[in-house]
Amino acid sequence: MTASETRRYDVVIVGGGHNALVAAAYLARAGRSVVVLERADAVGGAAVSERPWAGVDARLSRYSYLVSLLPQRIIDDLDLRIDLRRRRYSSYTPDPADPSRGILIDTQDAEATAASFTRTFGDAREAERYAAFGERLRPLARAVFPTMTDPLPTEDEVRERLGDDELWSALTSRPLGDLLRSSFESDLVRGIALTDGLIGTFASSDDPSLAQNRCFLYHVIGGETGDWDVPVGGMGAVTAELERVAREAGADIVTGIDVVSVSPDGEVHGVTDRPEVFYGSLVLSGVGEAVLARLLTAGGTPTSADEPEGAQVKVNMLLSRLPRLRDRAVSPEAAFAGTFHVNETMTQLDSAFVAATGGMLPDPLPLEIYCHSLTDPSILGEELRASGAQTLTLFGLHVPHRLIDGADPVAAGARLLAAAQQSLDAVLDEPLRDCILRAPDGRLCIEARTTADLEESLNMVGGNIFHGGLSWPWLPAPAATPAGRWGVATAHSRVLLCGSSAQRGGAVSGIGGQNAAMAALEILAG
């Protein structure tokens, strides 16, 4: 067998993120030869666990941190052994005007949830409106989520499945702000709902692009409930399991290879310690569309209009203990177990968008925080667990890449970290800094991961966590080709999308990988 023959595969997958591993596992289990090419020394992309601080036994989900959209069908199809835990507390939101009170949404105690609304607003009617809003969205999740692992439905088919033309129009035709203003009276509760439309998405509540509507849809349909689950062992445990099933099925996985070009006819050039060439009947792209465009033009650079832009900062922390709250009616263990919203009223979110659009860092910075180790202490070593240490994951919104692009990365990270701490301190009863653990070398166990860091370390252009804008998970009319039916088509018939750039990509879901594998199997069979 010649050297060139050993590099011929049915499918070559560029990029080794979780979607690529899902696609590889499906294809290999179907008897197809497949190779995954990953630039880093390990697979996983953004869905990895790492130890950021030397000498500290804490395995943090450094980038992606929650699982909201992984379908049970993919888990069953691939026989995945993963443990996803549901959080009891959905969220806690202190009132920025008076942080001594706030809304704690307890999924197991409706009376306690109503009581927190009453304590914050003086009556329980907003709690009733919030519950009614959730009930109204449930048919949407049941109508859309089961279709995510099937060929794309048409818009008319999904609308018929939903059976609520008014809700359909509100979500797909008008800015999300309209729906939230008509559903709630409180600026605070409108903000709680709006945040689901802004994770990784730079938009206002009334953005005419409806980018916030599409992001909102994806966040409320997951698992037909909209709940976000905690992966036991961290994100790295999910990736490790996907790698295991892909390898056991026969997929080849090559790490430490820098792919430098992709040709439309299936030829992929990479570099390790020497140039290497792989041939595939199909090429699946697990990298962003902007990166793929560069590879297809052999190193060319797309125009700025083609470049996606991220709009967030992620802060990872290890605390000696959870900080005290100004709200004495809520324990820190309850507040941080779910999503802790800070300075995220609808007015604050829209004001932050305006400030960032004008080139200014929002003040205060809107934040979302949660504590992984409260639900899953296994990510901490035995001594840390015994000491009462806890992780804290912070996600800052409305920090578009343009605010730090070209700036000194260390200075930019320090600036965003200071803004995040200042915003959080406004609702705490003590400075966050007093609770941050120190590593053996004396450093504080806290780090900021900016859009520039994502671009540098993960090759995510502009630091966009979705590889670009999210799309509606349906078609205006039936597609004629397998790639079109599955939402993974590119301009080249032998090159398919299999990552977050796929039509139903985004978040840790595996859907982009599963969709690409199904399209590839149809094409190869044909």
Image (cartoon, grey):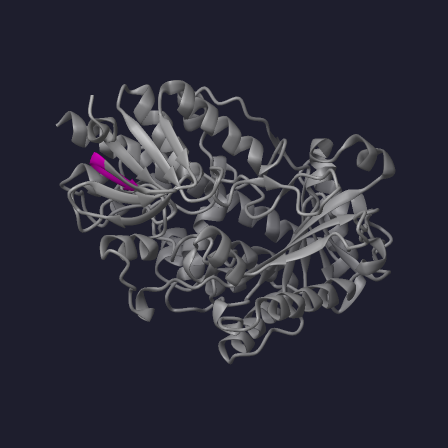
| Quarter-of-image position of residue 395 | bottom right
Magenta span: 279-284
In the picture, measured across the screen, residue 316 lies left or right of residue 436, that is left
Q: Which of 436 and 323 is in front in this view?
A: 436
Q: Can residue 69 be seen in this view?
A: yes
Q: Does the magenta-highlighted stretch encompass residue 124?
A: no
Q: Which of 249 and 226 is in front in this view?
A: 249
Query: 167 above or below 99?
Result: above
Query: 205 above or below 23?
Result: below
Q: Residue sitting at 27 percent across and 62 percent down?
A: 300
Q: Which residue lies furthest to the bottom in this view?
A: 358
Q: Which of 102 and 353 is in front in this view?
A: 353
Query: 38 above or below 398?
Result: above
Q: Residue furthest front?
A: 274
In the picture, measured across the screen, residue 40 lies left or right of residue 107, that is left
* Quadrant for the N terminus in the image: top left
In the picture, measured across the screen, residue 440 lies left or right of residue 5, that is right
Q: Residue sitting at 43 percent across and 54 percent down?
A: 459
Q: Can residue 109 be seen in this view?
A: no
* Quadrant for the C terminus in the image: top left
Position of residue 409 measured from the top left corner of the image (x, y, whole percent): 57, 67
Q: Which of 471 and 440 is in front in this view?
A: 440
Position of residue 442 measured from the top left corner of the image (x, y, whole percent): 81, 54
Query: 347 above or below 382?
Result: below
Q: Residue sitting at 45 percent across and 60 percent down?
A: 212
Q: Specify the principal SS of the magenta part.
A: strand
Position of residue 353 measured from the top left corner of the image (x, y, whole percent): 53, 72
Count the marks. 0
Position of residue 283 measured from the top left corner of the image (x, y, whole percent): 25, 39
Q: Does the magenta-highlighted stretch encompass residue 280?
A: yes
